Image (cartoon, rainbow, N blue to C red):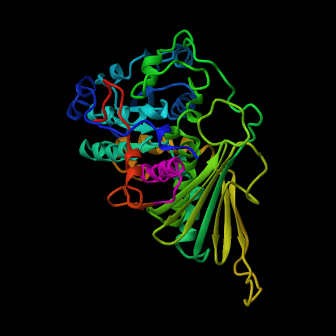
């Protein structure tokens, strides 16, 4: 079990830095239907580079500014987009009056501060998942987006998939019968060395380590944390927050479930000899108000498939859906004990045939910046799906099943666990 002391102690959050508030919403132009949307990219490394490539496919996406605290990432992005300007400090990006929106793909602990500051500066936001690393952060992001009337799209890109939309309609129409349980797994065999081991030392040339850490406690640089391996470093920004958000979001959409009533996560570091501080094997079970169960497994020490097909399974009384980004298969069920053995529906196979879902998602964001309609992965939906994963982290930390009041966003059966709904930021960073 991973104990509460492994989390940073919960504390106070207030307002974002005044420098981030310098530009008001009124000072930013609203692009028309035929205008280009001028974009600033904050974080252009791994996922940020993928998003740059995706937005570049759209003729009305104007890549104007590239920002990263790691100089090699900035240089690489600049080589691909020579007409864009570069910055190291995201606050310089938000001060600009010529940008319509920002794309945030920084380490997860930066998402809340940067999204809130961008909304305050009158910018629409595309922010990668997980939306936040604490539940309090996520709720505040929703509040500020609404206060400032900003479009905030979360990077749960399956929300823009025609395949998943078709399945959501199929299930909502009752064609799968009553769905009782869903399962999803993210599996890879990282044995024996995992993320490796590295002694604390000096950061590589060109990395502003203090700025990379931002609100997190000051600590020495370690190559098994940055620039990319942070998701194995800290329970707040873990693999269940990384991958679980995608799958819980898809399950919530396909079943229509809004929020959990309880969650229990178990796991541990059983097989890998590395610097990780999170489990190499984990399962979380969620129960929704409907009574339905959702199970997510993160296996990083064994690579065999967990499902017969695909990555997500939804089991109904008439049949079962197996789906991944390549397509879906609907497998009929037959009656079991004491029931008619005849198949209850016809089998179906659905191909995706729509390209990269990320491209559909970035297209939806640009359209919504112009139309001012809510995007397919609106910040509220992103917050609800992220909350499930973060509750899994808290359950793992305290070693108990948690009962959740979704309206009040409080844990009701373990008062001390509510301390883990947020943590104390390192000064001068504040939430806003």
Residue range in magenta is: 382-402
On the image, the x and y values in percent for residue 216 come to 42, 28
Magenta segment, prevailing SS (helix, strand or loop): helix
Q: Is residue 394 visible?
A: yes
- In this rendering, position of residue 127 left or right of residue 181: left
- In this rendering, position of residue 356 left or right of residue 211: right
Residue found at x 74% / y 55%: 306
For the residue pair 321 and 425, the one nearer the viewer reads as 425
- In this rendering, position of residue 305 left or right of residue 422: right
Q: In the figure, 393 relative to 106: above or below?
A: below
Residue found at x 54% / y 58%: 264
- In this rendering, position of residue 190 left or right of residue 53: right
On the image, the x and y values in percent for residue 295 come to 60, 59
Instruction: Count numbered badges in the picture.
Output: 0
On the image, the x and y values in percent for residue 74 come to 51, 17
Quarter placement of the C terminus: top left
For the residue pair 49 and 274, the one nearer the viewer reads as 274
Q: In the figure, 375 relative to 38: above or below?
A: below
Q: In the figure, 321 relative to 53: above or below?
A: below
Q: Quadrant of residue 22?
A: top left
For the residue pair 376 and 277, the one nearer the viewer reads as 277
Residue found at x 68% / y 55%: 327
Residue found at x 42% / y 26%: 217
Q: Can residue 84 be seen in this view?
A: no
On the image, the x and y values in percent for residue 123 come to 32, 34
Judge whether residue 149 is colored magenta: no
């Amino acid at each position: 079990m991973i104990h509460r002391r492994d989390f940073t102690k919960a504390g106070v959050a207030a307002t974002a830095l005044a420098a981030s508030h310098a530009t008001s919403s009124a000072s930013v132009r609203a692009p028309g239907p035929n205008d280009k949307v001028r974009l600033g990219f904050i974080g252009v490394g791994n996922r940020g580079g993928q998003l740059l490539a995706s937005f570049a496919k759209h003729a009305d996406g104007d890549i104007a500014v590239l920002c990263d605290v790691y100089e090699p990432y900035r240089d690489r992005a600049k080589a691909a987009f020579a007409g864009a300007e570069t910055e190291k400090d995201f606050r310089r990006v938000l001060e600009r009056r010529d940008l319509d929106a920002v794309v945030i793909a920084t380490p997860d602990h930066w998402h809340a501060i940067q999204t809130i500051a961008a909304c305050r500066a009158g910018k629409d936001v595309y922010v990668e998942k997980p939306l936040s690393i604490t539940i309090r952060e996520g709720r505040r992001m929703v509040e500020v987006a609404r206060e400032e009337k900003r479009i905030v799209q979360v990077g749960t890109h399956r929300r823009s998939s025609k395949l998943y939309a078709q399945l959501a309609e199929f299930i909502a129409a009752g064609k799968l019968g009553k769905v009782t349980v869903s399962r999803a797994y993210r599996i890879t065999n990282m044995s024996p060395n995992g993320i490796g081991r590295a002694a604390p030392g000096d950061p590589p040339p060109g990395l502003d380590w203090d700025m990379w850490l931002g609100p997190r406690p000051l600590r020495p640089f370690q190559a098994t944390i940055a620039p990319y391996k942070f998701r194995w470093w800290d329970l707040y920004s873990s693999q269940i927050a990384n991958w679980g958000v995608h799958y819980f979001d898809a399950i919530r959409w396909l079943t229509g479930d809004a929020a959990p009533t309880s969650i229990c996560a178990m796991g541990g570091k059983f097989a890998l000899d590395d610097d990780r501080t999170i489990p190499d094997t984990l399962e979380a079970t969620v129960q929704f108000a409907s009574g339905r169960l959702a199970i997510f497994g993160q296996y990083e020490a064994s690579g065999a498939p967990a499902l017969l097909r695909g990555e997500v399974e939804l089991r109904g009384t008439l049949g079962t859906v197996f789906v991944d980004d390549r397509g879906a298969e609907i497998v009929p069920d037959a009656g079991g004990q004491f029931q008619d053995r005849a198949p209850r529906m016809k089998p179906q196979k659905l191909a995706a045939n729509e390209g990269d879902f990320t491209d559909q998602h970035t297209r939806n964001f640009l359209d919504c910046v112009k139309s001012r309609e809510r995007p397919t992965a609106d910040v509220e939906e992103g917050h609800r799906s992220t909350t499930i994963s973060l509750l899994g982290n808290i359950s793992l930390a305290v070693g108990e099943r948690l009962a959740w009041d979704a309206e009040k966003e409080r844990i009701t059966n373990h008062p001390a666990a509510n301390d883990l709904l947020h943590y104390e930021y390192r000064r001068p960073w504040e939430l806003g």
